[in-house]
Each structure stands twice: as C-alpha cells, then as structure tokens.
Amino acid sequence: MALTKEQMAQRIARELKDGWYVNLGIGIPTLVANYIPAGISVELQSENGILGMGPFPFEGEEDADLINAGKQTVTLKDGAAIFDSATSFAMIRGQHVQLTVLGAMEVNDSGDIANWKIPGKMVKGMGGAMDLVASADNIIVCMLHTNKAGESKLLKQCTLPLTGVGCVKKIVSDLGVFDVTPEGFRLLERAPGVSVEEIKAKTEGRLVVEGLVPEMQV
Amino acid sequence: MNKVVANAEEALRGIADNMTLMVGGFGLCGIPENSINALVKSGVKGLTCISNNAGVDDFGLGLLLQTKQIRKMISSYVGENAEFERQMLSGELEVELIPQGTLAERCRAGGAGIPAFFTPAGYGTEVAAGKETREFHGKMYVMEEWLRADFALVKAWKGDRLGNLVYKRTARNFNPMMAMAGTVTVAEVEHLVEPGEVDPDEVHTPGIFVQRIFQGSNYEKRIEQRTVRKR
C-alpha cells in the first residue's frame, strides 16, 4: 500500500534531530509537526517571521496578526521570536536553519526541483521556495510518486520551470524513501507492501537498487 | 518635528499616475488597509506595486486590481487571487515574480543604499535569466538590484508623532524594509502615541524612515486561512 499523507509526514519526522531549526512547507510538510518523536526538541521556523511556532489556536483564540507562511492562524511557543522578512531569509540563506521540508511537482535524478509554475496554466509564484532550496544543506522533498495520469514525477529531466538546481538530498514519496546520489535516486526503503518492481516501473529517472531494500516501519 | 497627518487621503497627497509603490504585508496580515482604500478612491492608475502578495479578490491589493489601477505587480506569491490570475494570463497585467527572500533583501538594499547584492536564490532558474552570476567560495550566485519606491505604504501596531514604529506579531513581515525604501513612507497605525510612549529599546522602525503617519481606523484584519484545533 502506498503511504497516506499522515504516514509520509510520520516518516519524515523520523529524520529530525534534537536541537534542529526546521522549516516546513505548505501542505503535507506542515503535518510533520504532528509527529515529532518523543525526546526530540526542534524549533519550527516560518518564513513570514516566526521561530518557535506552536500548534493551531483553539477556536475563538485566533489572532489575525499571527499567521504562518501558509496564511494559517497559529500560536507561539514559550521562547518564540518574531522578526521581519529580511531577517527571516538571513536565517535561511545564512544556513542557520538545519532542515527544509517541501513539496514538489517534479524532481530529477540530479536533485533539480520544480514546484512553482505550469506555463500557461498555473502561476502562483515561488514564494520562499527558491531561497530555501538554494541555501539549505538538508532538503527533504515530500511528494506523490506519480501524477494523476500515473506518470512518474521522479524524472531524468524536469519538464517544468525549475525552482532550484542540484539541491534535493532526500525524497519521501508515497512509495518509498530515496537519497539523491550522483548515480541517481537510491532506494532506501519501500512503503509496506510496495515491491521494488513497482517502484522501478514508476520511476522514470535513474534508480539505484542495492541488495534487499527494507520495508518501512510505519 | 511632527509627521502626523489627519487621514489616509492627506497621507497619500502627491501620489500620481504611473508611480511605483511598496505595500507592506504578508497575505492579508499587516497590510495598510486605510491607505489601500484611499488609493482606490483616489483613482490613480498605471501603478507599479511591489508587495509580497496581491491580496484576495475583494480585499487588500485585490481591490486595486478590480479597478485596474495596477499596471505591474512585483511579488513572490500570488496564488490566492483569481482576478489577478485572469489579468496576468490575458496580458492585461504585467507581473514580475521574484523569490521572497530576494524581494525582502532588495527592499532592504534600496533603503540601505546598497545598489546590488549576490544571492544563491534562483540560480539556474528563469529568475536568473539575463542577470550577472558569479562564483564565490565554490558556489554560484545571482546579482540582484535594489528596489526603491516613490511611496512606501506600511502598517504598524503603534507609532509616535516622530514616526517610530512598533509592529505586532507576524504583521511585521515586509513592513520594516519597505519603510526604509520609500522616498515618502506613509505609516498607518492602530495606536498613535506621544513621543516617550514607545520605549526606545522596543522601536522596530526608527522614525527617520517615516515621513507621514496617521491613526488608522476600522481595521477589518481579515483572516485568509482560519485554522483551529479542538479543545
């Protein structure tokens, strides 16, 4: 079975290390905050100007002046800090944020990512994604392995306008976990019940499979 | 020194067709609601607006799009606005999309007198097309130029007669950099106070960057994505 959104978020949460500052993108990456392992303390950065972002507010306690980068109402943890957008991106470009998790429309086997524009159809803009992918040492992309037509989104070459070049280090898709290596996508784990053959068939880019690939614990 | 003006109409005196404006805010958070409403009433057109987002169809900068007063938008993310998308895809509206951190730094640079800087954001993408690139310490960077504006319209929580500003929570966002980069910076505040009522240690935007300040009214503070959890 392919992973659910929650299971993908859960799996990514296991990559977190104690003491990290982490930026979670909009969508599935936001869910990672719900699965931070016990005994691990991380601080969430939101690029509109928060360190120490807390959970969503209780009903009736929403504050229009306190939102995250997805424009959702949020709260602050004790010890949080607020700052302007230039300072926020100084944290990001200056590599003070240890991990970025974001979604993608396409990635390729040399680590390029496309997630901001479909020419002639959809132009939402890149927001902070270009700054984030150009700077972070550690980028995990969280995405569905195929599009609605069943075509691979892990490609030899991206077809959409790029967000960043050679920057993706790790991918958690609904079918497996992959490192991006000079040889291509290296399969580290399979989703429960998903075969190596299925992953091979649904991966257009170069895929490296070495030995027995373990099934993910979920 | 007294920078206080009576209202938004007076604060915007001098704004003319085809000017470049910076407008603070992130989404609908921390936007200068009073100044935007006054711009709609003024009827000025051909504006170039530099703002992280373009509002929603019936609020924020979306109001100026409905009335077709904006010729060009410079933003990082415009996904919440159907009228915007329509005007852009039809070619009525010119749009320059730039990475959010680059936008913030270009405003800061404009205010700080730094004509250009190098950033890794956008290297190898269409954002870097036609721009100088250079290698520093083994990594490639793109040269980006400062942004400046005829008017910068910002919103703060509290401000004094001298233009010292304090922002609240994430309503700060782009407001401080834009305040620095306007030839005329107009600040609207929820609380206009006397000098001495803002602790000097707590000033976010020093008054030197602000030319006009007024007490705003009737703040709607619309929430784009109301998200709550169960008790």
Image (cartoon, helix red, strand yellow):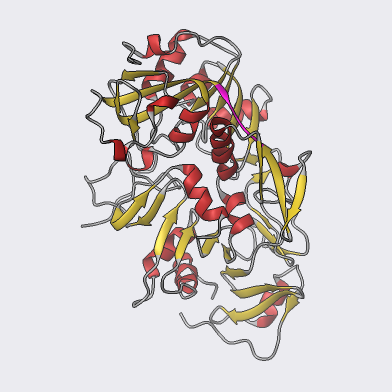
| Position of B48 relative to B175 (above/below) | above
A86 vs A61, nearest the viewer: A86
Question: Is residue A22 visible in this depiction of the protein?
Answer: yes
Indicate the quadrant where residue B30 lies: top left
| Position of B142 relative to B223 (above/below) | below
B20 vs A214, nearest the viewer: B20
Magenta span includes A199: no
| Position of B101 relative to A182 (above/below) | above
Q: Image check: A50 left or right of A15?
A: left
Indicate the quadrant where residue B108 lies: top right
Magenta highlight range: B145-149
Q: Where, quadrant-wise, is the N terminus of chain A in this rendering?
A: bottom right
Residue B44: give x, y in percent of width and height: 53, 10
Residue B164: give x, y in percent of width and height: 34, 28
Indicate the quadrant where residue B166 lies: top left
Q: Residue at x 60, y 43 (%)?
A: B99
Question: Is residue B77 visible in this depiction of the protein?
Answer: no
Residue A29: give x, y in percent of width and height: 48, 60
